[in-house]
Image (cartoon, rainbow, N blue to C red):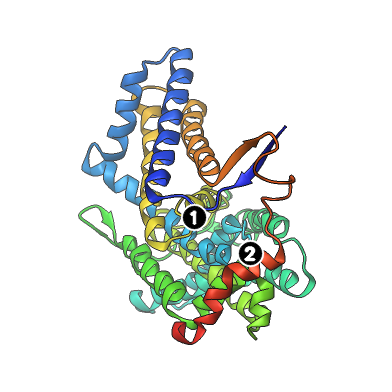
Amino acid sequence: MFRISKKESFSKKEAISYRLIGFLIGIVLSGIIIAALGYPVIKTFISLAEGSFGSAIAIRNTISFLIPLSVTALGLSIAFKMRYWNIGGEGQILMGATAAMGVSMIMPASTPGPLMMIAMLLAGFVGGSVWALIPGFFRIHMKTNETLFTLMMNYLAICFVQYLYFELWKDPAKMGFPGIQDIPFKARIPYVSGVSLAIVAPLIIVILVFFLIKKTKLGYEIRVVGESEPTAHYAGMNVKKIMFVGVLLSGGIVGIAGAVKLMGSTGTLSSSLGGGAGFTAIVIAWLANLSAPMIIVVSFLIAALEQGAQFIQVRMGVPAAVADIVKGLILMSVLGSEFMLRYKVVVGAHGAKNKLDAIPSDKEEVHHVEPIVETKENAL
């Protein structure tokens, strides 16, 4: 007999060691696959690194991947702090971009560029937050499963954007071909030395999210709700209001990611605008342990992996599927190391008394967060 039991604690040294081992295991597994398919292993990994960091162009491309990933992960981290599992990042990116696109289409052509850009960013926030609040409302008031609800909202968003692309917003200038007109050039985020100024977005948002979670009353309440809803109720907190605001902020920030991508790299709206960032950002948020500064670091590493995987397709002639396998094996191995870091396998009668020991009771949860409640006045 064996059981899986949660570890009581682990050191920073252990955390770094486990993640490094997981990364190395991913490299080894990827190397085996690459060798089995007849490609040179060492040369492939060198090309992977060159594609990510080997030139100024490579670094700029890595940064372009970083921007939507980091902003989306920062938005999702707010919801995850409340243990509200927002899996709808992809849809919220699309709806944020859709709202921004709509604003660019209805604003007069004489509108100054900076004013139009601000309006589009605000529209992106509203579009993402409204889309997130639909499942949020049902979770808060009817206790529905937000994981499934937010996941399904992704596909509704994709279908809605496809309808706009092929029908409602179809550009007559494209002579019968599907597509939506480009946003005005003055609403595009400029580049400086080949680097998009959109990089400012994650740098500003990471500061705001860190300050929100660590230094404000709302952030304190979000953390308490995430630790234990019964404790939050016991402390007199309005849990429904806290979750409402948390979901609104989470979806709004993800929506900004969509608006920024529209105004930066794409210039027009399509159902592929998200590019999977909404799903990859979930992995990033958890690998960063929901820490805002670490989200930027992990996003950069994942963006480098994304860019490197694309580069080896061109340099080595590696099929896209193989590049995706390499990327997936490395991510899977790192995620597996997270599980081994936080849990242990107990063999025999020692350790957990039953299979449910790894799940804390309500009493244990309340005891765990009591120190937070006792220092509430200081936190405010």
In the rendered image, is residue 293 in sight? yes
Residue 188 location in percent, x, y? 36, 64
Residue 149 numbered mark, or none: none
Please give left or right for residue 77 compared with residue 139 in the image: left
- Disc sitting over residue 285 in the figure: 1
Q: Is residue 126 visible?
A: no
Q: Position of residue 261 (x, y in %)?
A: 43, 58
The percent coordinates of residue 191 (x first, y second) are 27, 58
**In what element is the residue under mark 1?**
helix
Which of the image's four quarters has the N terminus?
Answer: top right
Depth check, front residue: 290 or 116: 290
In this view, the residue farthest toward the right is: 142
Give neighbour class at mark 2: few <14, some 14-19, many 20+ (Cα, 10 Å): many
Q: Say whether disc 2 or disc 1 marks the residue closer to the N-terminus.
A: 2
Q: Quadrant of residue 55?
A: top left
Q: Position of residue 213 (x, y in %)?
A: 46, 72
Residue at 34%, 62% in the rendered image: 198
Q: What residue did someone put label 2 on?
A: 84
Amino acid, disc 1 = Ala
Q: Is residue 279 left or right of residue 113?
A: right
Q: Residue at x 40, y 22 (%)?
A: 317
Q: Is residue 349 above or below residue 140?
A: above
In whole angstroms, how far apart are the C-alphas of marks 2 and 1? 13 Å
Q: Secondary structure at mark 2?
A: loop
Tally the marks: 2
Q: How many residues crowd mark 1 within 10 Å: few (<14), some (14–19), many (20+)?
A: many
Report the side of 36 relative to 197 (left or right): right
Please determine whether, in this image, residue 246 is positioned above or below residue 64.
below
Q: Nearer the viewer, residue 309 or 144?
A: 144
Q: Please name the amino acid that badge 2 sits on.
A: Tyr
The answer to which quarter of the image holds residue 116 is: bottom left
Front position in the image: 112 or 83: 83
